[in-house]
Image (cartoon, helix red, strand yellow):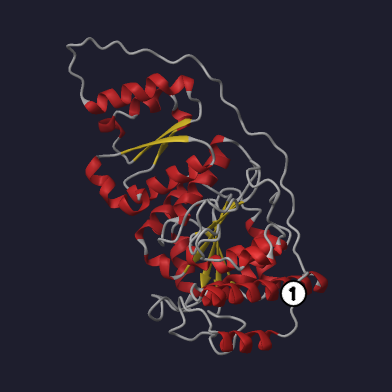
Amino acid sequence: MKDETTISHLERIAKLIRYYSLVSTTEVGSGHPTSALSATDLMCGLLFGGTFRYDTENPDHPNNDRLIFSKGHATPLFYSLWLAAGAIDEEEIMTYRQFGSRLEGHPTVAFPYVEAATGSLGQGLSIGVGTALNARAIDELPYRTYVLLGDSEMAEGSQWEAIQLAAHYELGNLIGVLDVNRLGQRGETMYGHDVDAYGKRLRAFGWRTQIIDGHDYDQILDAFEKASKSRKKPTMIIAKTIKGKGVSFVEDKNGWHGKALDRDQLNQAVEEMGAIDKSVRGEIRKPENRKRKVRETREMGRLDYSGQDKVATRSAFGNALLRISPAFPDLFSLDGEVSNSTRAERFKEDHPNRFFEMYIAEQNMAGVALGLSQRGKIPFASTFGAFWTRAFDQIR
């Protein structure tokens, strides 16, 4: 059992986070407060429970742990977390969803603590695979990647593309947090509160799973501590939660997705919550100060095509990728199991440690490429043009 003082402190912070999730959405008259409330204890426990490592004064620190909200509509929670960390103030959080504000309805990189723009569901885990792959196989850094997922988006095929690849590449530094609050936009999700259904499927795909009460800090802190020790298997923390947790008249009630409380309802909710300490703040552990692996830059190769040569486009691509590769050591190749056709295999033969097979999973490949680019890499992702249409949403 965790120290009672620690848990009491986390509960005070969580109350503050819930308060700002409510008042910021009521102020603008829109947003997803109930979706934020269900995951508040999970994220409060992550950031301020002693496992997460992040320098709030330097969001670009290479060893910062990465936090991706695949459940992008839960931005009232995301921004309130950073307020509780001392990164933004009350004046700014009250600009949520307003023109000119950095605090947009779904996260974008206009806000420096956002790892990637999300909101179209089913994309964040693929991006997380990219950042985790970068830490494990490229930069050789100790940071971990955490991805908050909603239960509704687990119906997306792209999720399972990412889940398969993470297990294949043994990304023990990738930790998913699945917020199983039972309710989607129009009613119950595919499995409702059947957390075992998610667990069985994820274990079958090669993940470690932990099933917890998402509002019990003993279980939350223990789960994050155990997940941080995984070496080869990615972990999914499957948390049974209550949508709208902390506000009795919206808890576990259908019809409240994407609706802000009105003023009278807000007053009732705040009265229920009791005294709120607006001065309380959480402390986040600082990251390690390790340098990333640096690769040597060499002279670019040469191509000698005469003006009369007819060269297939894919051959020209493969040759060009190989030619420029020495001068760009942060260039990496991803391919959707067609490298013998796209000619990316030429790059693979010369740079096997800079080539990653993505298999026939184009949506996930686009997300992984984004995750790598977010960490400063130059990914070239290749497949047939017709196949890229499957990943149109990710590309958009």
Number of numbered discs: 1
Residue 223 in view (yes/no) = no
Please state the horizontal and vertical placement of residue 198, each as a whole percent of the image.
46, 69
Q: Amino acid at mark 1?
A: Arg
* Residue 210 lies in quadrant: bottom right
Q: Is residue 84 above or below residue 266?
A: above
The residue lying toward the viewer, choosing from 334 and 223, is 334
Please state the horizontal and vertical placement of residue 108, each as a whole percent of the image.
50, 54
Residue 149 in view (yes/no) = yes
118 displayed left or right of 17 = left
Q: Residue placed at 59% from the left, 72% from the top?
A: 24
382 displayed left or right of 95 = left
Q: Secondary structure at mark 1?
A: helix
Q: Residue placed at 73% from the left, 56% from the top?
A: 284
The residue lying toward the viewer, choosing from 164 and 95, is 95
Residue for badge 1: 12
Please state the horizontal and vertical placement of residue 30, each as a whole percent of the image.
48, 74
Q: Residue placed at 46% from the left, 57% from the top?
A: 118
The residue lying toward the viewer, choosing from 318 and 246, is 246
Q: Quadrant of the N terminus?
A: bottom right
* Residue 38 lies in quadrant: bottom right
Please state the horizontal and vertical placement of residue 136, each as a whole percent of the image.
57, 41
Q: Is residue 24 above or below residue 343?
A: below
